[in-house]
Each structure stands twice: as structure tokens, then as C-alpha cells.
Image (cartoon, coloured by chain):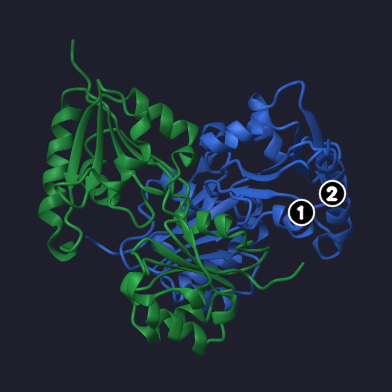
Chain colours: A green, B blue
Amino acid sequence: MIKSVGRLYGLGIGPGDPELITVKALRLLQSASVVAYPIADQNKQGLARSIVLEYIKPKQIEIPLYFPFKLECSAQPYYDKAAKTLAEYLQLGQDVVVLCEGDPFFYGTFMYIYNRLADRFPTEVVPGVSSTIASAAVLGVPLTYRNDVYVVIPAILPAEILKAKLAVADAAVIIKLGRHFEKVVGVLKELGLYERAKYVEKATMPEQRIVAIDRVNPSEVPYFSIIVIPSQWQP
Amino acid sequence: MIKSVGRLYGLGIGPGDPELITVKALRLLQSASVVAYPIADQNKQGLARSIVLEYIKPKQIEIPLYFPFKLECSAQPYYDKAAKTLAEYLQLGQDVVVLCEGDPFFYGTFMYIYNRLADRFPTEVVPGVSSTIASAAVLGVPLTYRNDVYVVIPAILPAEILKAKLAVADAAVIIKLGRHFEKVVGVLKELGLYERAKYVEKATMPEQRIVAIDRVNPSEVPYFSIIVIPSQWQP
């Protein structure tokens, strides 16, 4: 009998609240032999694992995938190594799930695994709730109406580029604020968007914090914080 | 004893596959007294209800909310009526969930209910998986990397506006194609984006259909079809 290879799943586990995982991702998570997840620090368990910790069973094999946060330009060897490790399990016929905060194809690291393995093993991506959309929910601000153009922008971009991109948006979400908060606020003020802007840290996580944007301390803005500029369209 | 009012929930039920509802939305759906959902045709059950039909219990009260599809400009009386109906149940202390395809605050109709009731009743929005993101998953195309700017654009916009908005995007999703398909294709060709564009109808629904964009018959493009233009960024 020829042993078939395992299946690879990229599982969107949502923005942080363990209950915001989909029924499908939960089912696949609990039925896989191998549960893999990114870690940014070799001494910590990683955010994705911590979100779904209650769902992982003792008999499941856990594989931390070490992707150093600060080395993105030279991260290729880390992705190669992660793909090689997972391929060994897949080759043995074991199903592997890779946990992905939010959605696997939306600003994630799963793509680097996907691009290395999807042509060799049956692969499925299970979409998840993005923190971009969950931020609007916890802030209580309707995000987009009818014919609105919606834009998601990483805060790291230079002020002039942020300005040009925001200018086309009816509604926008600015992600990965961290140390870029003050630059972003400057751009929002220039564009007349500051009054509309809402701020949230770690939406749906236990540490979630909502604070008026003019009360934010720029030196304490975490990476996982978001500014939402909701649509102005009035029904 | 003073009877307290009920709680209102906007539940994101995801893009179409019943398993793409979140664990939280499913729990709230099954524990509410009243399940409301939009219908666009008074003789049909509505898409949102059909997605989660297997989860609704016989003892739950079902309230269809009639929002005629073609009358958006004069839809206010329909939203007023829907809000009034739900308020009656909430006033009696019954919890009400409103089913929303995708996410409640992302191009939905729940906002019209939210804007009328959230100041009078305790209200919570449960975010859901958007079809925009689910389309990338079923197409197997990583959508956004690292510092990409992501844009969602309704196809109804005029060609010149589509062009201007698409020009700022590293990755884009064009929604609600329907009869606008040919116009969108023209714009994509002008911008040199046509080769990258992927097409999907009714992503994750039983009728899901993926077809190469140059094989699409423009006269048969449904409203719930999407074009995904994935990021070109190469790791």
C-alpha cells in the first residue's frame, strides 16, 4: 500500500479572542496530527499559539516556526527551514495545520510556507477574521457603506505616501502603528481626518485597550494597534 | 422587579460556507430568542438565513427584515420599520441577533439597524470573515505582504474613478461585479493589471465557481462575484 502524503492547512484563527476562530478552523485544528505556529522569540510560545491554547490537545505534535521579527530582509533561510520541517511530517502522511493570526493570506507569514509547499502537498487555506475588521466591531463604528472605497495601509510607509494613499479612501484602517503613531497623526491632521479617527490596541485580545486618539501616549503605542477611519457616508 | 431590555447582536456569519461562522457568532445565534435577517425578496428566505439554516432551532422566533434590493435611495422607511420591529422584542427583554453575510460593519445592512438602536439597547457586533478575504483563500493567491497597501473597490464606480483608486493599490479586491464586469476588465487592461486578476463567483458557497478571467461570460456575471488582484511582492 502506498502511503499518501499529508494535507497542509493555513488556518486563520482570527484577531485574538479564541471564540473568533471559525468552526472550520477549529475542527481542522483539533483533528490534525501536527500543529505549527510562528514564534518571534525562541523563548516565548508565540501569539498564535496563545490564542488557541485551550483548543490544542496534549497528543498533538507542536512545531514552533522561528521567524525573527526584526530580520525580515534576510528571513528567507528561516522560511526555508520551516518549510523543510513541515515537509517531513507531510511526507509521512501527517496532516499539518499552521496557525495564523487573522487571515493566512492577509499580511501573514503563512504565504512564505505556502509558496514553498503548496505545489508539493495538497494545501487548503481557511480564511479568518482580520483584526482590521474586528477593530471596527469593538470600536462600534460602521466601517464601509454601499459604494465606499476601503483602504488598509501599514503605518511604516513615509508620510507623503500615507497621504497619497489615504486621499483615495472613503474608509481606511492604518495597521502596525507602533513607533509610527506620531507620523500618522500628522498626516491625519493635514488631511482633515483626525477628528474621525478611532484608536484601538490589541482588538479582541484580553489586553484590548480603547482610548481617545488625543489621549494616546505616542511612546507607548504597541505594534498591534490600529487606527480606524470610518466612512462618513450618512444613510 | 424591573425587567431589563434585551441585547442586540450584529452577527457576522461569514462568506457562505456555514463552517466559516465563528464559534462566538454560532453560540450567540443559538442562544438568542429572536433571529432576524435581511431578505431582498418577500417570497424568498434570504441568503443570510440560508447560510446558517442548520443552526437555527425550531423554538427560535424568526424575523425577516425586508430591504428591497433596488430601492437603496429610498430604503430609509424599510430600515425604520425593521428597527421598530426589533425594538419591540428588545423592549420585552428578548435578545435579538441580526444575521449578516460577511461582517456586519463591512458593506452590510446591519449598520442601518445599528444606527437606529445602539443608543437605546446594549449592542454588540461580532466580526465575521469577509468574502473579500475568503476569495483569496479559495483562489489560492496570497493577498497582501508586509507593507502592501490594500484596496477594496465596488465595481459600480465609474471607470475613471476605478482607475484612480486602483492606481494606489499594491493588492486589490473589486466587489459586486455583476453588470460592471466589462467596464472593470477595460480598466484592468489599461492599468496593466489584467494578467494578475483572478475571478471567483460566490466564494465558499455551494455554487462557488472559479474560472479564468478571460473565459468569463460578461452577461452571466452575478452580483456576488469578485476580482482579486494579489500583491506582486516576491519574498
Residue drawn at (48%, 37%) of the image: A22
- In the displayed structure image, the side of residue B41 where residue B118 appears, left or right: left
Q: Report if residue B21 is visible in the image.
A: no
Mark on residue B155? none
Q: Chain of mark 2?
A: B
- Tell me the residue that label 1 is attached to: B113
* Residue under label 2: B82
Figure quadrant of residue B138: top left
Helix, strand or loop at disc 2?
A: helix
Q: Chain of mark 1?
A: B
The residue carrying pointer 2 sits among few (fewer than 14), some (14 to 19) or many (20 or more) residues within 10 Å by Cα, namely: many
The reply to whether the C-beta atoms of the residues labelled 2 and 1 are less than 8 Å apart is yes
The residue positioned farthest toward the top in the image shown: A1
Whichever of callouts 2 and 1 sits on the residue coming sooner in the sequence is 2
Q: Residue at x 34, y 65 (%)?
A: A222
**Residue A182 seen in this snapshot:** yes
Name the amino acid, label 2: Ala
Is residue B224 left or right of B22 when viewed as pictured?
Answer: right
Q: Quadrant of the C terminus of chain B?
A: bottom left
Answer above or below: position of A124 versus B155.
Answer: above
